[in-house]
Amino acid sequence: MEDITEEMLRFKEAVRHVWNTYLLKAGSPISPEIQESFEKLERELLRALVLFPIGMSDIADDYRRAPLPINLRAKSGLTDVPVQFGSVDRNQNIQWGLPSVIQAADISHYRYVEFFDWDPYGHVDLSYVKARASDGRLVLIQQIYCDFTTGAHG
């Protein structure tokens, strides 16, 4: 298992900076053109900053489409972690449940989907991680509670 927390946080900061500094102010941030450009930039930042150094650049195109083989791990010393579970409604919108607490060890079975912000069209902090649980449920975890690894669960 390889710890890639530093690389993931560098990626998160690069994404935040590009969006908040350049694209948020480039006309209408909600426009399909801006969103498509941002998704391409985000995917390539992930490829260059995280995936290429660990020999996995070929999976960058799966970003946001499927969970990546990047596992979450609770920060050292934590016994419990607050999370929110999501379910997809009939209109394909995600409905997030109320926060609940799980055992910290359980998040090692969650796979990274993306960094998340409640208002993706405004100034973003990306303070949450959206992941997929081993049972298929979507889950949100505040990034301050987790690190990132590749390789075997643990």
Image: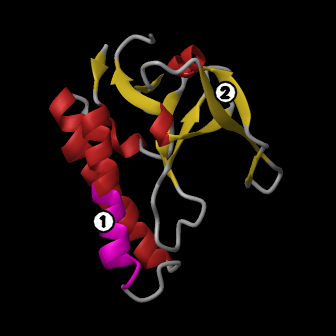
Name the secondary structure under disc 2: loop
Residue 42 x, y percent position in the rendering: 34, 56
Q: In the rendered picture of this protein, how many numbered marks are placed on residues?
A: 2
Q: Which residues are magenta?
A: 14-25
Question: In the rendered image of this protein, does residue 53 appear above or below residue 1?
Answer: below
Q: Which mark is residue 136?
A: 2
Q: 109 left or right of 36?
A: right
User: At 26% across and 52% down in the image, what residue appears?
Assistant: 45
The crowding category of the residue bearing disc 2, from other C-alpha atoms within 10 Å (few below 14, some 14 to 19, many at least 20), is: few
The answer for how far apart the CA atoms under marks 2 and 1 are is 31 Å
Residue 41 x, y percent position in the rendering: 30, 61
Question: In the rendered image of this protein, does residue 56 appear above or below residue 41?
Answer: above
The crowding category of the residue bearing disc 1, from other C-alpha atoms within 10 Å (few below 14, some 14 to 19, many at least 20), is: some
Residue 135 x, y percent position in the rendering: 68, 21
For marks 2 and 1 on the same chain, the one whose residue lies earlier in the sequence:
1
Q: Residue furthest left?
A: 53
Residue 52 x, y percent position in the rendering: 18, 36
- Residue matched to label 1: 17
Question: Disc 2 vs disc 1: which is toward the camera?
Answer: 1
User: At 50% across and 80% down in the image, what residue appears?
Assistant: 31
Question: In the rendered image of this protein, does residue 142 appear above or below residue 147?
Answer: below
Q: Quadrant of the N terminus?
A: top left
> Of the residues shown, which amino acid type is indicated by label 2?
Gly
Q: Residue furthest bottom?
A: 27
Q: Is residue 78 magenta?
A: no
> Of the residues shown, which amino acid type is indicated by label 1?
His
Q: Quick one: 76 or 73, which is closer to the camera? A: 76
User: At 46% across and 65% down in the image, what residue appears?
Assistant: 124
Question: In the rendered image of this protein, does residue 135 appear above or below residue 20?
Answer: above
